[in-house]
Image (cartoon, grey):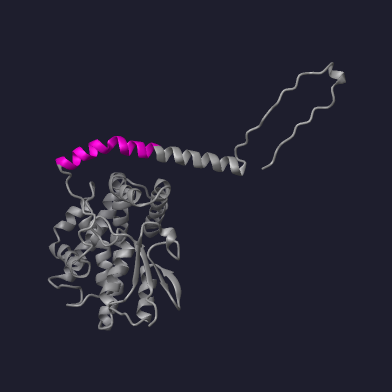
Amino acid sequence: MAAPSELFCWKAGLGLPSVNTDCLIVLAYARFAGAPLKIHKISNPWRSPTGSLPALRTKDEGSCSQPSQIIIQLRKQKYNADYDLSAKEGADTLAFISLLEERLLPALIYALWIDSKNYVEVTRRWHGENMSFPLNFFLPGRMQNRQLERLRLIRGNGSLEAGEEAEKELYHDALECLNLLSQRLGSNKFFFGDSPSSLDAYVFGHLAPLVKIRLPNCRLQQNLKNLDNLNTFCTNILSLYFPSESSEGVSRPVSSTQQGSNIDNEPYKRRKQLLSVLVAVAAMLSYALLTGIVAIEHVQEEEPIGPASLRGPSHEEEEEE
């Protein structure tokens, strides 16, 4: 029996099977199609075969990224969640996926990565706590810059920045998309009847973060709460296909006992932070010395033996490492 393909994706957290939209899409599709994948849930994208997440590694086809490419590979292996769709339903699938990527995805990127309050209190905090040192010091910031570039590319605006005007425009387009999705779903369990398809995977991947992650500043979440069928849609997929992961990482109010424990551990946390900073500074200084960026010059003064005319020419030596 051939070895199963391997899927690399962001680890579970914040009440989701994965904290990343693209990873949620691929995980949901694989479950819908019954693909027997070996799944690696990690918090370091550099450990994947493509250097990004999600990534699929197959024995015959090599590795690929992006949900669309991964889904194509799974279909080549006869795992097709769209097998029973008609030609019209297939066309509707492409149209709604395009709508999601043009209207809802920009607002989701903005809410998680660009809004400063959400980024600092939720997104950066989760990645910082789940990444190993020293990646947690610089990788979340680099990821934020890439998400901003991605948002600008999707919107066709190279100077787009966080602000009330941009937020209002993005959330307006996203709300229109949510209303269209709600109308299309209606009272159905899935978008094309009783069986999930690739469209259900894409919608789930975009909606689940808004349903499950508690963001301190996101009006779009309030609008989504009014669309009961979309909320039920996400909840059903989590309970049916990810029963053991849907409750992981859900933020809960801290009890008085936990608060007391946190206060008791505060000196220990600060000591760990201080040690981490000292280690980082020592590592950078060692690197600078070893590479020659910083050099220590030893100067030795000699007592004059006699008049200047009797002393030989001075020699300055530089030691290379």
Name which residue lies at 25% across and 67% down. Answer: 203
Is residue 273 in the magenta section?
Answer: yes
Q: Where's residue 150, x and y in %?
A: 39, 57
Residue 269 drawn above or below residue 68: above
Give the image location of residue 249, x and y in percent: 24, 54
Q: Which residue is drawn at the image coordinates 29% and 56% (left, top)? A: 108
In x, y percent, where is residue 89? 25, 79
Residue most extreme to the right? 310
Say which residue appears at 31% left-offset and 61% top-offset. 21
161 with respect to 208 (left or right): right
Depicted 316 relative to depicted 92: above or below: above
**In the image as oriented, which residue stretches furthest toward the top?**
307
Q: Quadrant of the C terminus?
A: top right
Please tell me how many numbered marks the rendered image carries: 0
**Is most of the magenta stretch helix, strand or loop?**
helix
Q: Quadrant of residue 73?
A: bottom left
* Place of residue 167 in the rendered image (x, y in percent of width and height, measured from the top left): 28, 50
Q: Quadrant of the N terminus?
A: bottom left
User: Which residue is at the front of the view, 250 or 118?
Assistant: 250
Q: Does residue 265 lie above or below 119 as drawn?
A: above
Instruction: Say whether residue 100 is left or right of residue 222.
Output: right
Pick the front one: 268 or 76? 268
Magenta highlight on residue 32: no
Find the magenta span and give its range. 256-274
Q: Which quarter of the picture shows residue 68? A: bottom left
